Image (cartoon, rainbow, N blue to C red):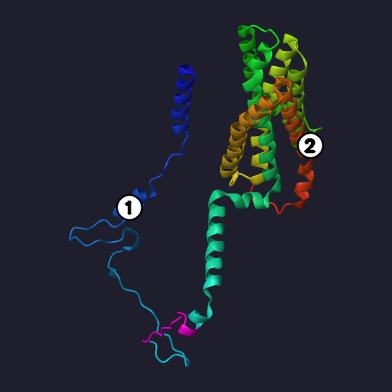
Amino acid sequence: MLIASAVTANLCVCCALIRPRKVHKAAKLMSDSTESDSPNEDGVAIDNNNTSTGDEVKIGTRETPDIVSDDLPTSGKVLQYDFSLTVEDKSSTSSDSSKCFFVKVLLRRISTELGLHTFAKSYRALLLCIVFLHNQAPYITFVTFLIPRVQAVDVTPSSATFLLTFVGIGVLLGRLSHGMLISWKKVPVEGVLGVMMALCGVSLIIMGVTDVYVLLAVSSFLQGFTTGATLSITLFLMRHFVGLANFAVSCGWITFVGGTGLFVAPIISGLVLDLTASYPAVFYIFSGISFLGALQCLLFPLLKRMEPGINSDNQL
């Protein structure tokens, strides 16, 4: 845990350094204006761009022509109009409509600040968050009950712990190979995501059915591989659905939804274990959640035709 915390601390420092350089435009403009408006020997500031020999420099004056019109009284007078509401207009506005208008404006402002309008224009982005929830919930359940499950079939603690290594290797390889997976032109990226979700459900079924250590290791690796690939593919699709301008807030929402799955899934799986007293039952139920996420990937082409769309740069 200390090593993991040290690595995380180093990542925080590295992330703090990834910032664009700020250009001090105000200081630059001030320096330019100081150089252009340099005082002469008499202490009078003269514009270097508008000076010539023998010309008189006028500072702070501008000639304006008189406005002559039959409708206006004189050119020297300025007409002032009072656009404020009269007492009768203010009394005609009801308090209920004012409150409704205020609530509507407030909700619209909150929706804009939180980026909820993005999901109102891109239904596929909303569905992608739901699919990611169906991926994170089985993953945390798999990792939580992996060691108790294999120890129940007379596997030594050291061998049971080693299965987590297969999960980590799978996650790493899944993230590295997602570029090759989505580059396959015969299958769309949404289809690749559905295949990964289906393989995630298969790994859960294997963990619930078999007691062979080799198959348990294959199940662990497959679970890690599908989870790593799903995470990278999800970010890729989110960038494609919402564009670069809305990508940051959309990543925040998809992380929030995935974190909700990581929080709720152990509670639900613990209740299932208390009711059934069976580890395979837990894996079977969450494999169904993974398969449900795979079926939801079939809705992406339909939502593409239904959604209003976002006017942004969606080029990959």
Q: Please report contact status of discs 2 and 1: CB closer than 8 Å, yes or no.
A: no
Residue indicated by mark 1: 30
Q: Amino acid at mark 1?
A: Met
Q: Position of residue 253 (x, y in %)?
A: 59, 42
Q: Position of residue 147 (x, y in %)?
A: 64, 15
Is residue 78 a member of the stretch shown in magenta?
yes
Q: Position of residue 214 (x, y in %)?
A: 74, 10
Q: Which residue: 53% across, 54% down?
A: 110
Q: Which residues are magenta?
A: 76-88
Q: CA distance from mark 2 to mark 1?
A: 61 Å
Which residue is the extreme one toward the left? 42
Whether residue 315 is visible to the viewer of this picture, yes or no, is no
Quarter holding the C terminus?
Answer: top right
Residues 141 and 153: in front is: 153
Q: Quadrant of residue 221?
A: top right
Q: Amino acid at mark 2?
A: Leu
Residue indicated by mark 2: 295
Q: Quadrant of residue 54?
A: bottom left
Residues 181 and 24: in front is: 181
Instruction: Tell me, for residue 234, which label it has, or none.
Output: none
Q: Residues within 10 Å of mark 1 (few under 14, many from 20)?
A: few
